[in-house]
Every structure is written in C-alpha cells, then in structure tokens.
Image: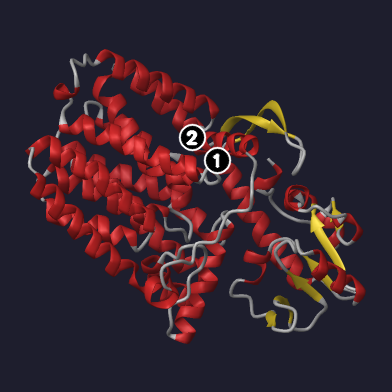
Amino acid sequence: MTFRSKALLLLCWLALVAPQTFLGYGSDGDSWLVAGAAERIWTTGRYVASRSSGFPLFEILAAPLVHAGGWYLANMLALTSGLLFLLALFRLADRGEMRHPVLVKLSLGFLPVVTTNSSSTMDYIPAMALLLWAYVLLLEERTRQSAILVGIACGFRPTSGLFILPCAVYLWKARRSVWPVVSTVLLATVVGLAAYSPVLLTYGIRHVYPEPPVDLRTRILVGGYSALELLGLVPWMAVAVSLALSLRRRSTAGLASVSPWLAFHVSNIVVWTALFLGMPFESAYLMPLLPSVMLLIDRWAERTTVAVVCALLLCYHVVCVDVLGGESGSRSLHLSLRPGMTIADIQDRRFKLSTRRAATAYTAQRPTVLMFGNPWIVARNDAWIWDESLGMFRQSHGLLFVSDRILDESRLEELKRRDFRLVVWKGEKWEYLRACDFDWQHYVEVIDDLPGFFGTPIDGRTLMAR
C-alpha cells in the first residue's frame, strides 16, 4: 500500500471519527465519570479513580485535557490512539501479515465499535492500540518492548495484562524454552504494577465493586445480547461462519503442527472470551479478540468471503437487526431493523447533551430527586454542587437533585417523609424490578415522558430505548 493510499485511508477515518468528538464525552456513561475524576485529579493533585478498578494512566492523561478544553480536548486522547491503532495495522500489512490488507484494515480500523470509542473519553482504544503494537513487536522478535507495552496497557485497562498469556504461548511455541516466557511475563508484570500503581497506592488491593446479584438465566440472556451489540447480529453470524470455515480448511495433524502464529490467535480469543463470560455486561470487553478473529479469517478465507464479512461489518454503522423488544424490566425477543451503532451512538450523545441542558435549566416546585442521568448531567457542570448531607448532587440555585437509583428502602422512606419527590425514568427502572424485594413504587414515581417532565423538547434518542 502506497503512502498516498495510507494517507487517504487516514483522512477518511478522521472524516468519520472527528465530528463525533464534538458531541460530549461519549455515549457510555463511564466516559462522563472519567471526565469528573480527571477534573478532580487536576484540581486536587491526587489520583481519583473514575469507577470500579481504576484506569490510572488514562485518567491522569485525561486530567489536563478535560480541565483545559472539556470534551473537545479530552476526546483527542482516544482519537490519537485510534490513529495509532490504524498505524499498527499498516505495519502488519507492510510485514506481509495480511493476504487481503485493504479489507482487513477496513474491517478493523473502520469497525463501528472502534470508531465510536475513538471519539469518546474512554480507555478501550488506547489499551487496544498498545496491545496491537505489542503484537507487532512480538512478531518482530522485540519481546522486551512488547512486554513493556503490555505492562503500560495495564495502566489504561488493568485487564490488558491478560494479553501476556497469548504472548507467552507464542514464545513457547516459537522458542521451546522456558526462560523467554518467564522473563517476558515478569517484565510485563513489573511494568504493569508500575503503571497501575496510582490505584494501588491510593486504594490498596481492592476497589472492585461487586456486581449486583443476577440469576444464571439473566446473566446468559444479558451476556448474549451484550455480545451481539459488539458487531451486530448479522455481522456476527458472518464472522462466526467464516471463522469456522477458515479453521476447518486448515488441516491439523495434532498440537505439534500448530504454528506459534495460530497458537497466539486461538489463545487470545479464548482468553478474552473467558473474561467476558465472567463479566458479560459490557460488549467492549471482547474488543481485544477482534484482531485475532479477523486475521484468522484473512489467512484462510477466500477474498470473496473476506469482502462479504467486511461489507457486513461496515453496514453496522448505519443499520442493524435487533432482537430485543419491550422496555426496561420487561424485555422480549422481537426482530426489528434499528439504526446501526454509529447512528445510534450519535443519537445517544445528542440525547445526553440535551438532557444535561434540560436538567440544569429545570425549575422544581419542591425538592425532587431525579434518579437518572447522574453521570452526564453533573460532570464538569458548575450549575451543580455536591450536597454532603444527602450524598448527591443538586442544582446550586434550585431544588432538583440527581442520583443513581436509590435501592435502600429506609433511605427512600426518609426522603419521602421529608416531602422529596422521587422519580426515575422508565428506561432505568430495571434495577428496581431486579433488586428490590419491597414495594418500591410506594416511594418512586416512574416517568414515561422526559420532555413532559422537563417541560422542553429532548433531542436525540438514548441507547437505552433500543
């Protein structure tokens, strides 16, 4: 691929991704939590985790960007990482690692889940870029540099450390010696601990919030639907069939015939699938296995097959076949055509910005707790202050409070006794249906119509309404 072709591909990618960076911190509520934590890091000079296990290098790097330019600058961190991800794909193609380089680069670089996350203040793409470059260096036999990148990636997402397992498998198959494997794993571990040290020094060895209890059936259904969201139903089917046929074409005469390359990619898929089965509520957890899936298909599938897979993956930008119907708490199987990931992501980001403005301008006639939109309504919003006595944000000159869902009956009862109006939007009532064993509707009012509640039109459409 010529320099001009690479530049054209990068410009097309920027034309797709850059406009989305102007639409808030992202559709994922966690991106707004990162922004809030980054601002606190900048103002206090101390590390603050945005959520769960902490993502220290990303949160620290985002701090000056959030403070200086809000989402306009903060989103540049992921956008730059997306460009580095593309450059890693170019490097692999230049090394001859792809039979159909243009199709593979389009399939991975322009994948909707990659482009949408490259325009948000989220850590998925920075971690992915580091891991893909670690793979490039592994193929180039620069194992120390590869291990260092895996360790650094742990500072962006601590689960990135799992990538060292397929790297170790590759080294064992390639060299048949224990020391290269042990030294690489040790180096990645030391660097990973250093990269993750802000969390360890601030919070100790913990800071992982337990998931709410979920029965096995719900876990399977939610996990299955979450996995489908990553690529879309039809693209997933095409990928699965193509991958199965590709692996079938490769004759295997036993484990001894498995190449280091194949061992790496198969083990990489196994590792991230196992992680997702343990935490099946976020489709993006599966992202690190996507390069392996696509490179396996590219290696053994016919060009026509790869082209069809590529076309279906890219169609997910604009349209998808959804399998879920109904509203929060009462979902059912229902096939329908919906906007694809990119269109839905843009609609959701417009929705968040619109509800942020509406909540800030809302005039409540009595103390009101809105248990919806907490992450994006208050993040770096000077119109809101923290109410220490109630443990939630409120308007600095008003009676509207925002909070996550309050599931403690005694607290709900206390607020009700103090004449607070407690409201939750219908799209977020699922937590009450799943986690409460008391008559929560005695305390909480369900809002069907957000424009009616705020008294102003709401732009866009939330992903939760899909």
The quadrant in which residue 196 appears is: bottom left
Q: Count every numbered label the image shows and give the total.
A: 2
Q: Position of residue 137 (x, y in %)?
A: 16, 48
Residue 218 falls in which quadrant of the image?
top right
Asked whether the residues under the numbered discs 1 and 2 touch, taking CB atoms below 8 Å apart as contact, a structural biologist would say no
Q: Which mark is residue 341?
A: 1
169, 95: nearer the viewer: 169
Looking at this view, is 396 or 207 the one in front?
207
Residue in the image at 52% along x and 36% along y: 227
Q: Nearer the viewer, residue 234 or 49?
A: 49
| Residue 382 position within the rendered picture, expressed as x and y whole percent measured from the top left | 64, 80
Residue plotted at (22% across, 64% down) = 190
The residue mark sitting in front, 1 or 2, is 2
Label 1, label 2: how far apart the Cα atoms are: 9 Å
User: Which circle's residue, 1 or 2, is located before the other in the chain?
Assistant: 2
The amino acid beneath tag 2 is Leu
Measured from the top left, where is residue 119 in percent x and y? Answer: 46, 55
Element type where label 2 sits in the image: helix
Q: Residues within 10 Å of mark 2 (few under 14, many from 20)?
A: many
Position of the N terminus by quadrant: top left
Q: Is residue 67 above or below residue 15?
A: below
Q: Which quadrant of the rendered structure holds the C terminus?
A: top right
User: Tag 1, which secondary structure?
Assistant: helix
The answer to which quarter of the image holds residue 260 is top left
Residue appearing at x 78%, y 83% in the figure: 397
Q: Is residue 371 left or right of residue 11?
A: right
Instruction: Indicate the amino acid at tag 1.
Output: Met
Residue 231, which numbered label? 2
